[in-house]
Image (cartoon, grey):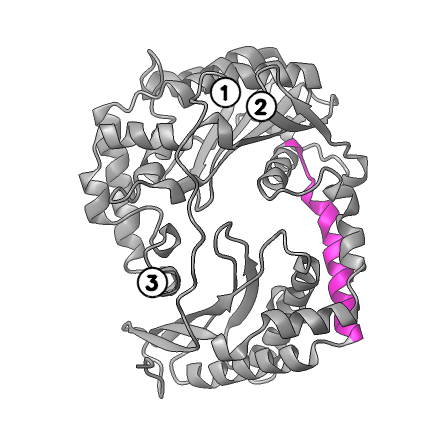
């Protein structure tokens, strides 16, 4: 990502460190006077509040031929606003012990704000200026553009990035998911200030915003603060992306790269977050490749056969094209054997599911680790925003572990047969693997 204002000032850091137990979390659903919805967890133990603002759609809303515009625009939000240049903006934030960070991702542009109660209104005005009145000064554009181009050029030499970007390009094609959100050297070099203004108006709009907040603020105060920050943004942004069609069938693609080891990314279509079978799929993946050394892939590929340094899998919950994805690295002479074992394990679990012991171990870990996520107001605010972006129910935090524990071995048999398709597994391998070549 573009370097951005992420430093926490000393007074703020001391306040962030106080955790709130998951069992104490009471989520309030509020609507501001201006009609903006938000979720809030009040915690008045410290004079501090964290606010997460997510604009759904994210970098996938780039206009045709303008790939990277939203990413570059997001990196410029801290580079001056209103009558403040970038230096004045940074000094103003530091002077009131406020912290703002901005991120561009595939499905959302995110804003993280942390502020002391005594400076809350002034900090809100500063954040409003960044979102509503960004300057997009030419010198800042050129400086941040140079940073982005440096990132793009570095990624082009990174085998991990080459593998994932090739996998996405082959699978998603012309959909925004098929290209890097940073854009290319050519597309970023061609962006104008007008393109950045258009990207801002397309992305930062009130019709796609979700807000999570935690800390020393009441529901009434939060509603007024949200309107203060967001009320002057455009009412509507660009249309949301279309569904992405997955274009890869089973096989292998090899990208030549001069290295003694290879990097591989593999997978196929997955399951959406709102699918009724999501929780069984979530538990299933923990056993398949999400559970570190407990997982089946790690045991069979690394521990039993020594074919890799590490392997994992995860459910990629992209809004418009979910996947089941895995990755590993290995010496060039072992890659083909590792792929064979992975396919065999994929097929075995699809046909035979997992054992009762594996299910119980996965449930113990997933339910035991969940409360540890709520280790401060910043984390809680982020979780509340992500829950809304994923259309989760208000009681999700309270019921999530019950849903994990409700998964049965019969559920896993049904879902494994449904979502694990060994014949559709495609491997993108970057390196010089022995005995392996691209299909077709």
Q: Could you tell me which residue is drawn at 63 percent across and 17 percent down? A: 223
Which of the labelled discs sits on residue 254, or is there none? none
For label 2, the residue is 36
Quadrant assignment for the C terminus? bottom left
Residue 218 visible: no
Disc 3 and disc 2: Cα gap in Å? 40 Å
Query: What segment is highlighted magenta in the picture?
Result: 356-377
Along the line of sight, which residue is nearer the eye, 367 or 438? 438
Q: Could you tell me which residue is drawn at 52 percent across and 21 percent down? A: 98
**Quarter of the figure with residue 17:** top right
| Relative vertical location of residue 92 with respect to residue 242 in this rendering, above or below | above
Which of the labelled discs sits on residue 162, or is there none? 3
x%, y% of residue 182? 33, 46
Q: Is residue 322 magenta?
A: no
Disc 3 and disc 1: Cα gap in Å? 38 Å
**Element at label 1:** helix
Q: Earlier in the sequence, mark 3 or mark 1?
A: 3
Callout 1 crowding tier (Cα within 10 Å): few <14, some 14–19, many ≥20: many
Callout 3 crowding tier (Cα within 10 Å): few <14, some 14–19, many ≥20: many
Considering every residue shown, the one lying at the far bottom of the view is 435
For label 1, the residue is 230
Residue 78 visible: yes
Q: Earlier in the sequence, mark 2 or mark 1?
A: 2
Q: Is residue 367 magenta?
A: yes
Which of labels 2 and 1 is toward the front?
Answer: 2
């Amino acid at each position: 990502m573009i370097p951005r204002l992420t430093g926490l000032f000393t007074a703020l850091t001391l306040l962030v460190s106080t955790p709130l137990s998951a069992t104490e979390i009471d989520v309030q659903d509020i609507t501001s006077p201006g009609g903006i919805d938000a979720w809030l967890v009040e915690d008045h133990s410290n004079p501090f509040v964290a606010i997460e603002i997510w604009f759904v759609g994210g970098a996938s809303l780039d206009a045709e031929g303008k790939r990277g515009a939203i990413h570059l625009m997001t990196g410029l939000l801290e580079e001056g606003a209103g009558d403040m240049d970038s230096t004045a903006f940074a000094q103003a934030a530091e002077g009131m012990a406020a912290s703002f960070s901005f991120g561009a991702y595939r499905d959302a542009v995110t804003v993280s704000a942390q502020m002391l109660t005594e400076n809350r209104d002034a900090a809100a005005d500063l954040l409003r200026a960044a979102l509503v009145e960004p300057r997009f000064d030419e010198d800042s554009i050129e400086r941040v553009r140079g940073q982005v181009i440096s990132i793009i050029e570095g990624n082009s030499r990174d085998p991990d990035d080459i593998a994932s970007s090739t996998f996405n390009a082959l699978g998603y094609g012309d959909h925004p998911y098929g290209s890097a959100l940073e854009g290319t050297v050519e597309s970023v070099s061609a962006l104008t200030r007008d393109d950045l203004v258009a990207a801002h108006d397309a992305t930062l709009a009130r019709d796609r915003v979700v807000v999570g907040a935690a800390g020393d603020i009441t529901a009434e105060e939060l509603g007024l603060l949200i309107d203060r920050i967001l009320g002057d943004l455009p009412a509507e942004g660009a249309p949301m992306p279309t569904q992405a069609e997955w274009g890869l069938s089973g096989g292998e693609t090899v990208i030549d790269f001069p290295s003694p080891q290879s990097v591989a990314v593999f997978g196929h279509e997955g399951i959406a977050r709102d699918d009724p079978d999501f929780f069984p799929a979530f538990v299933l993946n923990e056993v398949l490749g999400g559970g570190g050394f407990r997982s089946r892939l790690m045991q069979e590929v690394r521990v039993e056969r020594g074919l890799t340094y590490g392997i994992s899998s995860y459910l990629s919950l992209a809004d418009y094209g979910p996947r089941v994805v895995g990755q590993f690295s290995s010496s060039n002479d072992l890659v083909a054997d590792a792929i064979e074992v992975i396919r065999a394990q994929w097929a075995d679990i699809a046909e035979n599911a997992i054992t009762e012991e594996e299910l119980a171990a996965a449930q113990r870990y997933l339910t035991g680790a969940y409360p540890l996520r709520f280790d401060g107001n910043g984390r809680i605010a982020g979780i509340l925003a992500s829950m809304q972006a994923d259309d989760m129910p208000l009681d999700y935090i309270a019921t999530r572990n019950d849903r994990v524990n409700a998964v049965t071995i019969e559920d896993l048999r049904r879902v494994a047969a449904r979502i694990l398709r060994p014949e559709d597994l495609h491997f993108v391998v970057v390196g010089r693997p022995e005995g392996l070549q691209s299909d077709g």
